[in-house]
Image (cartoon, rainbow, N blue to C red):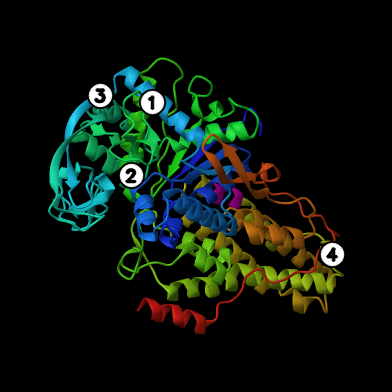
Amino acid sequence: MTSNAQKILVGVAWPYANGEKHIGQIAGAYLPPDIFARYQRMVGNDVLMVSGSDTHGTPVTLKADAEGATTAQVVDKYHELFVEGCVAMGLTFDLYTHTDTQNHWDVTQQMFLRHLEAGYIYQAVQQQLYDPQAKRFLADRYVEGTCPFCGYTEARGDQCDNCGRIYDALELKNPRSKITGNTDLEVRETEHFFLDMGKLNQPLLDWINTGKEHWRPNVINFTRGQLELKELRGRPITRDIDWGVTIPLAGYDDKRIYVWYDAVIGYLSAAVEWADLVGEADAWRAWWDAGVNPDALIYNFIGKDNIPFHTIIWPGMLIGYNAGKGDQLNLPYDVPANEYLNLGGGKFSTSRGRVIGFNTVLREFQPEAWRYVLTAMAPENADVEFTWQEFMERVNNELVANWGNLVNRVLGFAYKRFEGRVPVPGELDPLDQALLDEIRSGFTAVGELYGAVKLKAALTEARRLSQRVNQYLNEKAPWQAIKQDPAGAATSVYVALQAIDWLKLIWAPILPQSGEALHQMLGYDRPLFGRQYTERITDGRGSHLVLRYDHTPATGRWQAGSLLPGQAMREPVALFTKLDETILAEKVQAVA
């Protein structure tokens, strides 16, 4: 890292550790930040990409009940499953951890005490739904029913996935317990701590109306619309449960800090944990501490169902924290939320059987096929329907036929006809120079799209540039010209290899694994990218697995270097596998 580089924190949505994730979640929240982070590292910026498994969410405890296991066992099982998928997919987290760590507990409790001291937390008695069959209060995600705003019949107890509105569980129509299915619920009183969101409404509105021109329309319009209603009110941040972060005050042993408050703090706590792991306890401040670096940029990558928590609640928590004495924290710079990738006419849903498992498909198909297709289909501005037919067509007709075929035929020809070395070119003609100028310009054009988180458009432009090289080769036809004009053929092949060498970098944020393979085939010894690895950490709450990434080799690689004539190549192999239509037909039939 360099001291004068732009500090960019990439905060990635924290998935529940309650099962195998599906490709809709990967397309919406986990692949986009990796592409963005890889580009920013290649430019030379200081990127810290963090996330982890949400261990305290109600879906985790419900899963434990369903499997007859302890919550800790469920967390370990599914946290490690997701880490396995991240490694296979090449998601380069500087730290992927989880929320049941001593570090996260400490940071969450510090945030709680700071809010309490600053007057943004208060105590009050509230009415809450109680399931007499289960003999327990129903925390928000333990109850579902009909949304009071849009009429969606499977709304959760605190937020509707259909319209995105936030509400109190008592506002639900026809509420039912997710534990027992009981619809004969009681309303009882219980005392809790509340975050005073009403006090934060105007400060949030002032913040959202300043310098947010770069935000996606769906994000800014929804957020501004909610804040302009002036309907924010105190939200309880504790629950009558026994799984979660304890309240750092005496006398509340039967209550816990609730997940919606503690999970978003993970963006901060993960940075603190990362700093401790690299042996520089205050290193996190370069991204988070406004007194140290107010120019750091914080991005939060999420799906659209998480917009209110990341554009209203989390910024509100940071504003409330900054009202207290001591250090001041940076607020998010951008929240590039995606819409949904749907399947079978609706949102991916485990309960309805509309699922394509993340780990499962990574064992069946090349990870790079998924990275390509999920970027090409990215639901950046509207919901997108996933079909196996489109998956196959994009892999075979675009990834394999365009970029893959270009690499295979040029490197194969060069290796065979020029004794395994990059040919030495003669003088370039206007056609040669025009191609190189156009491909070189891709570092600016495609780079601007990556930087603006317009990843789908970046892929489209990279694909167009790849096709330009194919068109150039069709005109030059070096495989025919080599018989009569070997020097001219050598020049054409060199120009094509130089263009491929540059395109390798332009494609690299989306296709890093094949980019590394191509880098080696072109004869380079220095790795293009860093090293992904896992390690097990032991702290005051036990042992937990983390995923880390050493990205030093990739820093500052976004530039049009010169391919050395005469450089020894390595024997080329096909980068991508064409999909078998028989296998895909089975997938199509399964969905139907």
* Category of crowding for the residue at label 1, using alpha-carbon neighbours closer than 10 angstroms: few (below 14), some (14–19), many (at least 20): some
Residue 248 — which label? 1
- Residue linked to disc 2: 307
Q: Measure how far apart labels 3 and 1 are at the Cα level.
A: 14 Å
Do callouts 3 and 2 mark residues in contact (Cβ within 8 Å)?
no
Q: Is residue 237 above or below residue 580?
A: above
Q: Measure how far apart labels 4 and 2 are at the Cα level.
A: 52 Å
Q: From the top left corner, tell me how far across and down residue 228 is, in percent.
A: 20, 34
Secondary structure of residue under mark 4 = loop
Do callouts 2 and 1 mark residues in contact (Cβ within 8 Å)?
no
- Residue linked to disc 3: 122
> Residue sitting at 53 percent across and 74 percent down?
397
- Residue 510 appears in the figure: no
Secondary structure of residue under mark 2 = helix
Which comes before the other along the chain, label 1 or label 4? 1
Which comes before the other along the chain, label 2 or label 1? 1
